[in-house]
Image (tube, helix red, strand yellow):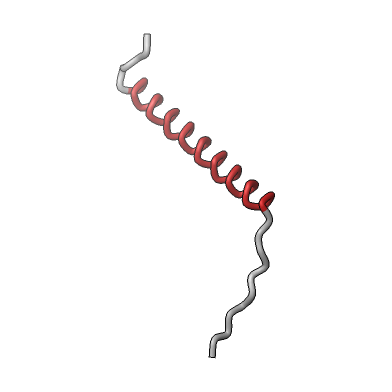
Amino acid sequence: MNHHLKEKPRSTAMDLLWMGAIWTGSVLTLGVVAMGFRALMSAAGMSSH
């Protein structure tokens, strides 16, 4: 016996919303990591100028 739950198709708008949320989260995370590296380098005496 196969009992498969029928999934209703997801809307394109919801897919785009999720993609935008994941992209925004990854960009923010990358920014935080970059600022952390910059702070570590500054604390070690390295500067960009």
Residue farthest along the bottom direction in this orientation: 1
Locate residue 10 relative to residue 45 in the image: left or right. right
Q: Residue at x 53, y 36 (%)?
A: 28
Q: Position of residue 19 (x, y in %)?
A: 58, 46
Q: Position of residue 21 (x, y in %)?
A: 60, 44
Q: Nearer the viewer, residue 27 or 38?
A: 27
The image shows a total of numbered marks equal to 0
**In the rendered image, the vertical position of residue 7 relative to residue 21, given as above or below:** below
Task: From the viewer's perspective, tell me whether residue 20 is left or right of residue 45.
Answer: right
Q: Is residue 16 above or below residue 27?
A: below
Image quarter where the N terminus lies is bottom right
The residue most toward the top is: 49
Which quarter shows the C terminus?
Answer: top left
Identity of the residue drawn at 58% across and 85% down: 3
Q: Residue at x 42, y 29 (%)?
A: 34
Residue 37 vs 48, above or below: the answer is below
State the residue at coordinates (62%, 51%). 15
